[in-house]
Image (spheres, grey):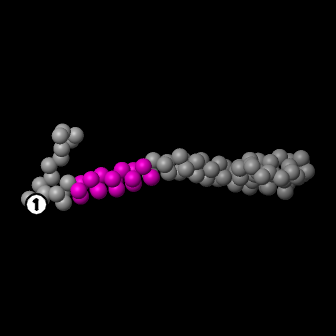
Amino acid sequence: MQAFHDATISETLQHLRNEAAECLPGHPFQIILDQQLRVLRDYAIGIELELCIFRSDEPRRQARVMMAEESTSALRQLVQGNDDKIVRPEFGKK
């Protein structure tokens, strides 16, 4: 069996299924092993997909946090400058 350094879990499980099919063709143990490896591979595919979605969403989450911090800071500056506590946005007018 060759090493899979860059393979995903699902690819490795599929490779194990193929290896078992070659080593034990038609053996009852091979059939059970194949079914279990197939289920594990299906779970692994789901986990890999979930992780991919999470990783792709991480930059957007960080941008939302940054925008919330910046808008909160800008609002605090507007409120601190007014004694009557009424926010008067300028909207770029000078």
Count the numbered circles shown. 1
Instruction: State left or right for residue 43 relative to residue 63.
Output: right
**Residue visible at 23% across and 56% down in the picture:** 77
- Quick one: which residue is furthest to the front in this view? 94
Q: Is residue 51 left or right of residue 32?
A: left
Q: Position of residue 57 (x, y in %)?
A: 49, 48
Picture quadrant where residue 86 is located: bottom left
87 displayed left or right of 65: left
Which x, y percent locates residue 80? 18, 60
Q: What residue is drawn where x is 89% and y is 47%? A: 22
Work out whether residue 38 can be spotted: no
Residue drawn at x 71%, y 52% is 9
x then y, percent, for residue 84:
8, 59
Say if the magenta span includes residue 75: yes
45 or 73: which is nearer to us?
73
Q: In the rendered structure, which segment of residues is drawn in magenta? A: 62-77
The outermost residue toward the top is 93
Question: Is 7 included in the stretch rendered in magenta?
Answer: no
Residue 72 vs 25, above or below: the answer is below
Residue nearer the viewer, 63 or 58? 63
What amino acid does circle 1 point to? Asp
For image coordinates 71% across by 50% down, the residue present is 8
> Visible in this render: residue 49?
yes
- Disc 1 target residue: 83
Q: Position of residue 5 (x, y in %)?
A: 77, 52
Q: Secondary structure at mark 1?
A: loop
Main secondary structure along the magenta-highlighted residues = helix
Few, some or many residues within 10 Å of mark 1 (<14, 14–19, 20+): few
Pick the residue in front: 90 or 14.
90
Query: Which quadrant of the rendered structure holds the C terminus?
Result: top left
